[in-house]
Image (cartoon, helix red, strand yellow):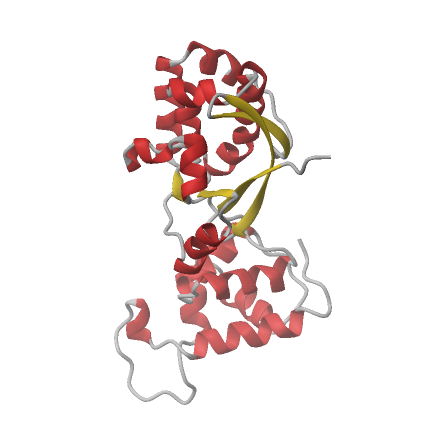
Amino acid sequence: MRTLERTRPELAEFLRTRRERLMPEDVGLPSAKRRRTPGLRREEVAALAGVGLTWYTWLEQGREIGVSADFLDNLARVLKLDAAERRHLFMLAHERPPAEPGKTFCIVPSLAARLVEDLAPHAAYIINLRWDVLTFNQSADSLFGFGQHGSSRRNLLWLLFTDPGLRDAIIDWEEQAPAMLASFRRDFAAARADADAKKLIAELEVVSSDFKSWWRSQDVHAPCTGTRLIRVEGQPVEFEHTSLTLDGGQHLRLVVYARTQPH
């Protein structure tokens, strides 16, 4: 894809400044004696990136040439760009961010954890792409029994199909569970390169025939929002529920359940 007129000069300047901040020893080349210009030479970057000097020179001069995502990833590696710089490179060269691999392991920021607590009395918890329940408040624990399970099994999808208590709590489980599973499928698609997510699916197919049947049906739904009936102290209570993206980079999602207001 070609870069647009307005981004080519910025791309050229960005590449030049990133190149000039590196020294040969930073990229595994022999330490150089005094140079007339700072940083790496264009021919060194071109060689490390596996492209011709003329082609790379044109790119750094802001000429209208096409670049692939694979090349940009390779160039980001050569220039030792951090995540923000890599994203900026893609925005300048392709006018869109790079495809990011879905993360399942992540740490909840302390402010986000505090937000979950502050949402009480509404039930709130945070999940990742694998639907591991990373943190939750007391209201969520009362509804879903998260605290009864060790952190290694505190996974919303696992509990949905293996925990009799949660199954009993969700009224119309036979309708709600496949809808939630279809919603999970979107996150699994983003994380499918992650072995842990695949392992979770494989384990659930062994222990739950319902899961196995519904998973193989390939149904995909929009994100789960709306109302859900949950048994509280033996009585059905209607809750509104929604999920909010809390941290797109870490793929964290905040889920909130609030009792519906009486009419």
Check the image and report above or below for 154 versus 102.
above
Check the image and report above or below for 43 versus 118.
below
> Is residue 52 in view?
no
Tell me the residue at 68%/64% (across/down): 64
Of residue 199 and residue 151, the one placed in the foreground of this image is 151
Residue 3 position, x and y percent, is: 67, 61
Of residue 248 and residue 118, the one placed in the foreground of this image is 118
Tell me the residue at 60%/20% (across/down): 219
How many marks are shown on the rendered structure?
Answer: 0
Tell me the residue at 58%/67% (across/down): 59
Of residue 189 and residue 107, the one placed in the foreground of this image is 107
Tell me the residue at 40%/42% (across/down): 138
Residue 236 position, x and y percent, is: 56, 23
Of residue 11 and residue 191, the one placed in the foreground of this image is 191
Query: From the viewer's perspective, is 156 left or right of 95?
Result: left
Check the image and report above or below for 97 versus 167.
below
Quadrant containing the C terminus in the rendered view: top right
> Is residue 114 in view?
yes
Check the image and report above or below for 8 versus 235.
below
Where residue 55 sits, quadrant-wise, is: bottom right
Where residue 110 sits, quadrant-wise, is: bottom left
